[in-house]
Amino acid sequence: MHKILILPGDGIGPEVTAEARRVLETLVDGGDLDLSIEEGEIGGVSIEANGVPLTDETIDRARGADAVLLGAVGGPKWESIERDLRPERGLLRIRAALGLFSNLRPAILFPQLAAASSLRPELVAGLDIVIVRELTGGIYFGQPRGIDTGEHGERRGYNTLVYSEDEVRRIARSAFDVAMQRSRRVTSVDKANVLESSELWREIVTETARDYPEIELSHMYVDNAAMQLVRAPKQFDVIVTGNLFGDILSDAAAMLTGSIGMLPSASLNAEARGLYEPIHGSAPDIAGQDRANPLATVLSVSMMLRYTLDRADLAERVDDAVFAALDRGLRTADIAGPGDAAVGTRAMGDAVVKRLATNGG
Ligand code: NAD
């Protein structure tokens, strides 16, 4: 039996995770899945209850779970408190505690929503790519780093871009494993024409690919990748890259879809256990009003089924239920077009769950 820990968090977090929980429960009730679901506190709600954004007890429960589903944290109420006690610290702590080094950021654009993109619909309709970003190494963590004053009194700031063979090997494996669940094409993005760390990156990714003969691997310089992402994004399937390049490219790719309420994410550790969460925040402006789009969190459940629970069949059923709800014309306010009547969080969840209950395998 799998164990899932849900951490709803703040703002719209409880509303969107409630719908995602119903999706999991529908699969359990239909006899498709055997799992236990627990809930815990993170972020502002944990500060209110326990004085800290994440307790050691919750970390232990997260470590004991196969997967964690997180809503969102933060809000105006906690913006002025000491930095170390802010809700966002809870997120950083749980990522570190679970050793999550592989960040999966899909950019999916359902054809029904193609008009929301800043690109022409024919370039993006049906877009479905995953950016696998190394999350715990590279220039964001490399030593030495700092700002100091040189001989002539002029200050200089510096950081170190460093990747070890092991770090590259494990993120490459993670990306290849993801690609094996998809169309088996991986583009590794680097800057090997200028950076030695990228030269090693390319060498190790190529070497690791020998263990995955089914994978079609290509390499691309990051400047070209940025250009190709806005020129012809559908040429990509899985992109694997380092922390800095991944940070930038994944945000650019997300914006191709034009709908923050639709985008899921996953962060995995070496055992493919993970933390699944929508990429959006706690949206305090619409919290508690039944206006939040729950689909990013529902699609995070789909990723959980695929990448941690190894149930691609059920992930496809969830994706299909989301597709069907959109096809019926259901839109929450964030994705509604000019003439569309918007439905609420709960009604969108109802539509997905209803379809899921009837599209059994
Ligand atoms: P946000 O993502 O919460 O909201 C940005 C805009 O998008 C808002 O207008 C909001 O109403 C809308 N939006 C977001 N998710 C939506 C959804 N599911 N359905 C419909 N509309 C949606 O970003 P923000 O306003 O910059 O931040 C608000 C709070 O969230 C801050 O406290 C911030 O620190 C926190 N935050 C948390 C996370 C996280 O938990 N991972 C990520 C980003 C921001």
Image (cartoon, rainbow, N blue to C red):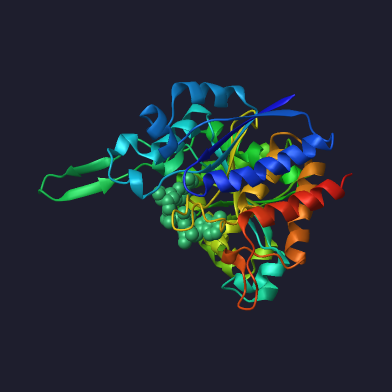
Q: Residue 308 placed where, x, y %?
A: 69, 34
| Outermost residue, right side | 361
Give the residue furthest to the left.
Answer: 152
The residue that appears at 44% across and 25% down in the rendered structure is: 55
Residue 215 coordinates in the image, percent (x, y): 75, 46
User: Could you tell me which quadrant the N terminus lies in?
Assistant: top right
Q: Residue at x 79, y 54 (%)?
A: 320
Which residue corresponds to the image point at 72% horizontal and 43% vertical from the top-left?
Answer: 23
Left or right of residue 76, residue 279 in this image: right
Quadrant position of residue 142: top left
Answer yes or no: is residue 87 visible.
yes
Can residue 213 be seen in this snapshot? no
Q: Residue 152: percent from the left, percent from the top?
A: 10, 49
* Left or right, 303 with reference to 226: right
Q: Give whichever of 132, 257 is nearer the camera.
A: 257
Nearest to the observer: residue 25 or residue 309: 25
| Picture quarter with the C terminus | top right
Relative to residue 80, is residue 283 depicted above or below? below
Q: Is residue 135 above or below residue 331?
A: above
